[in-house]
Amino acid sequence: MPEAPPRPAASLSLAARLALGITALLLVGGLTLALAAFAYGRAAAREAFDRLLVGAANDIASAIAVESGRIVVDLPVSAFELLALAQDDRIAYQVRDVNGSVLTGYRDLPRPPQGAQFYDAVFRGEPARYLRLTRRFAERAVSGSVEVIVGQTLRARTDLAYDITRKALYGLAIGGVAMLALALLVVRSALRPLDRLARELSERDPQDLTPLVANAPREVAPLVGAVNSFMARLDRQLDILRNLISDTAHQLRTPVAALRAQADLALSEPDPTRRARVIERIHKRSVSLGRLLDQMLSHALVVHRTGSVRRESVDLRDVALDLVEAGDHPALAGGAPLTLEIGAVPVPVLADPLSLREAASNLLSNALNHGRPPISVGASIEDGMHLLWIRDAGPGPSAEVRAALGQRFQRSAAAAGQTAGLGLAISHAVAEAYGGCLRFDLVPGGFRAALVLPGEGTPP
Amino acid sequence: MTGLSRLAGLGGLVSALLLTAAAAHAQEAVARFGSDRDTAPLILRTTTDVAVLSPAITAFLRAHPDLGLIYEQWGSNALYAVSQADCDAGRAGADLVISSGVQQMIRLVNDRCAAAWTSDATASLPPDLRWRDEIWGISREPAVIVYNRRLVPPDEVPRSRFALLDLLRPEGSAYAGAVATYDIEESGLGYLFAFMDSQEASTFGALMETFARTGAVATCCSAEIIAGVGAGTYRIAYNVLGSYAALAARENPDLGLVLPSDYTLVLSRAAMLPGPESPRPQAGALLDFLLSGPGQSAMAQMNLVMGTSPDQIEPGDADNSVPIRLIPLSPTLLVAMDTAYETRFIARWRATFGR
């Protein structure tokens, strides 16, 4: 029992990849945003609560008066109500007389840095923010600056900064979820055409190889194109197969009918000598039929390979060399001399070496069967085309025959038990498959049959 | 004092040993509650009379039989001074401090003398009655007008500050010289009420002027004022702590109470757990108990938690509700603690009462 083919390992789904990517983005973005929001929140909180300090300090400063030659402070409750807006923060304050002595408030506050208005310092072991404000008095009894210092601890500021950060992150979280949902939605809707394609393909009649008509998104179009061109190739292959089968049937019908007639004749022939002659004819026929079958198989093979095997870089000189060195050609039994004519320059083409060899071998067979020795095999570059050729010393076939050479199949030839037509057809098919052609011409020294192919790297 | 001490016996809940104030410390009285075997009893320092808080303390210790508690009763200024000294020395001194000198407690918290404590009980307090999770208001006691029923005919009972002003306005009024209020130099509570009055209403100026003109008497301490009204020395006392007045009125039917209908100040005694270290859990538990339902009802027995219409309190006007001005536990009270402010305020007040 054959094992089920292993399923291709399913790679991560597109949606999962997207979710992963967006999550990573959100994490990085969230971290950045949290830092930015915290920095912003701190600045905003500082600004907001610094204004409270300003308000309170102004309140206190405006409540300072000169009474009977002395500075007096009538501490306003409103100033402390302002500061109490930072609900859980402790309040530090101090008012200094023109001579620097503390008029009222906390005596042990840290001194402000030189020239500073706002400054950070400690209030009884807790970090705090201070504001220093001065009010000038120029009266007969009192002249100079009265200093007002107001401070508060940082709890409300920190809370506000965290609150701003938290809200920014809430926003990001909501946005992130929306983004994720939207992305998944888009992915699903974008992949829907693929589902439709898959359904269309699976519901299709196996014989139906017409191109798919799909209004797919641009990104999916290459896939549709690839499927269509694949189906077109499949269609061509099927055509070839159909032709092959019908051709084969045609090819075989006549010789088999002839064989049968001969066999019938042999059965009804009482005279042994004549029967022996008939049997000899049957033998000749069957040998010829065998060769025909070989060639048809070879043809089928070549046709199949040119359609399906990957092309590789082949040096035509190698093919020629192989051909000469193989030396096992059936027609070489006669011991006719075979020479190799190749240069120092490589003659590379893109093709299937086996098919090339088959094609060349067929040309060689023709030369051996119909030409006149000596026979040469060679490879060369002429006018930018790469040639693999066979040359014999004969005059070649007549002009009409030459014109018809290489046409696909001459059934008459097969019917006559000759196989040259089919051999040429193979060569022709190979040449065409690789963007070239067969060329027959009279050259100095005889008749030359050549496979003409575009060089590797030159567009066909 | 004596009337309240008798009350303590009357309540029958106190298994306390009352010591005299003279014993080495500045506290007015010391009592020991609960287990005698507890080698590290809780120390509670408070301005509240032992008798008034003892039902709540006893109820708490009933649930904690192994716990001992030393109850120190202090005057508010002395309590502030000792707490401040402890704080400066970096020690707690007591486990729980409860004072009616709310402004002093606020100052202590602002000076970072308190430790934080959070629980369901503290969290359920309204924002006005807690600050920084370091100070909490545990009682509700209105500032009332107390009068002597024998000396003040019903139609002359002052239902509001305006009515009081009207009583004193006529030349040669019978009430001249017969109205008493706290001496705010002596009593931190009196100062707080006067400070709040000065914030709350323009009647404060008129009241001061009238008190000055009619020779009102300023004297110390709730007990003395209430006793004076009960005995007929004064006809009317202004801004007396309602809890003490209501207790005294249980004993003396001549005493009448009025919640002023223009507005009634309500004091919430402030509690804090002295720092700098985190408080003992038993102290936190005591605080939580005082804020809890059973604790509040135990305090309500002694009128520490008063509605606006308990039995002894007559409604100000026809309708029972009077506008309440709760003294908030807020840093605005720091103004009252400002030395320059206090000096000026007291100087003005002193001018009024001709001292």
Image (spheres, coloured by chain):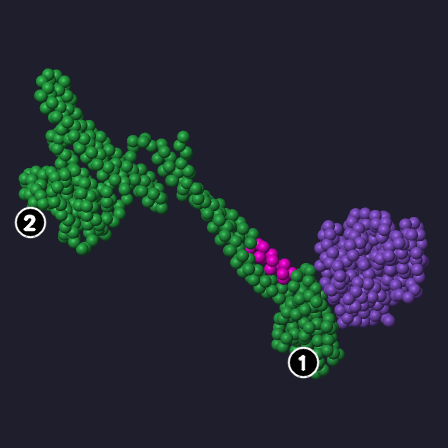
Image colour for chain A is green
Mark 2 crowd level (few <14, some 14–19, many ≥20, 10 Å Cα): few
> What is the chief secondary structure element of the magenta stretch?
helix
* Residue type pointed to by label 2: Pro
Disc 1 element: strand
Can you give x and y, in whole percent of width and height, for residue A377 in the image? 14, 47
Label 1: few (<14), some (14–19) or many (≥20) C-alpha neighbours in 10 Å? some
**Does the CB distance between marks 2 and 1 fall below 8 Å?**
no
Q: Quadrant of residue A407?
A: top left
The residue at 35%/44% (across/down) is A220
Q: Quick one: which chain is purple?
A: B
Magenta region? A156-168
Q: In the depicted view, which residue is nearer to us: B94 or B201?
A: B94
Q: Is residue B115 above or below residue A293?
A: below
User: Left or right: where does residue A140 sit relative to residue A323?
Assistant: right
Amino acid at dot 1: Gly
Q: Who's the residue at 90% across and 52% down the image?
A: B14
Identify the residue under disc 1.
A144
Side (left or right) of B203 relative to A441: right
Q: Position of residue B95 (x, y in %)?
A: 81, 59
Q: Is residue A16 above or below residue A157?
A: above
Query: Which chain does tag 1 point to?
Result: A
For disc 2, the marked residue is: A444
In the picture, the quarter occupied by the N terminus of chain B is: bottom right
Would residue A72 be counted in the magenta stretch? Answer: no
Is residue A159 in the magenta section?
yes
